[in-house]
Amino acid sequence: MSKYFRLLRVIQWIKNSFVFVPLVFSRNLFDYELASLSVLAFISFCLISSTVYIINDINDIEADSSHPVKKLRPIAAGEISISTALIIAAVLMILNGFIFLQLNSYFIISALVFFLINIFYTFSFKYVVILDIFSIAAGFVMRVIAGAVAIDVEISSWLMLTTMFLSLFLAVMKRRSELEIVKVEDIQKTRKVLQNYSIAFIDQMATVAAAGVIICYALYTVSDRTVFIFQTEYLIYTTPFVVYGIFRYMFLVINNQKGENTSEIMMTDLSLIVTLFLYFITTIAIVYHVL
């Protein structure tokens, strides 16, 4: 089953946890009905994401074959045929159709927009400098929007901006890692858009994106709306976890040459795992007045 798990990129499903952001920050985490809807939304995005990954792997089969890491993907390595992969993708979409029946029309629209953004990215946007990064970021933003409409709650503008800058940051760092891994002569064979980037340019974008994450999140924690909803100003004390997480991620990508697989880093680096855990526990304690 290993090759099918790699085909579906199960480890990448952690990215879809962004759909839970509205549930947590709307103070509905312990509402069984709304939590159930969020879980369905998460499963739906996992199925859509895996479908997109399959389509992307089929489209990039030649480029992946020349990549030092991606050549091990099931389709590029010849472990799974294209016809089998297409059947699996069709089954995933059918299963997703049943989940759509349990969710409202606004979520369905958001999920379809997410799917279309990724399809356009697969066949077009990823070949256009800067637009490729914004397309990846748009996917994360759509996850948050979908999570909000699934349970019919409003989401803070500052939190949306934080999500946008965070996703831009992760996308930029991914490109930096790819640029270091792939040799100059192999760029044309693997990801042509990399020839339009340089380490210096990417580092400047990463700095701007990282600053955007920290500033927007800090402003979210002290905004009048946030203080009014949570009835506390203590959320600002979660900011150090965000700052440390950003710096730690930059360290891993720049100094340790990691970053191509965001999910793998977040699930294998002990410091990041501890930071995320402490952030989550502290946030829950403050938002839900556990302390």
Image (spheres, rainbow, N blue to C red):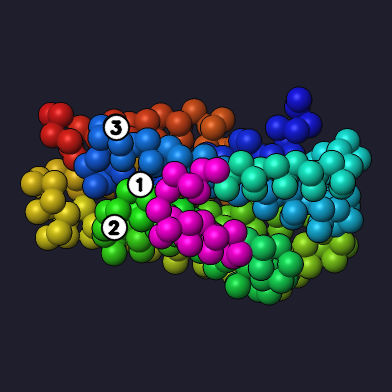
Boundaries of the magenta span: 98-117
Task: Look at the numbered disc 1 and give the secondary structure of its residue.
Answer: helix
> Which residue is labeled 2 in the image?
155
For marks 2 and 3, the one nearer the N-term is 3
Image coords of residue 71 (percent x, y) = 84, 44
Q: Residues within 10 Å of mark 1 (few under 14, many from 20)?
A: some
Q: Nearer the viewer, residue 259 or 290?
A: 290
**177, above or below 281, in the image:** below
- In the drawing, what numbered circle is on residue 32? 3
Asked whether residue 55 is drawn in magenta, I would say no
Q: Confirm whether residue 65 shows in the render.
A: yes
For marks 2 and 3, give the one nearer the viewer: 3
- Seen in the image, is 116 located left or right of residue 193? left
> Which residue is labeled 1 in the image?
21
Q: Nearer the viewer, residue 52 or 176?
A: 52
**104, above or below 129, in the image:** above
Q: Confirm whether residue 263 shows in the render.
A: no
Image coords of residue 210 (percent x, y) = 43, 58
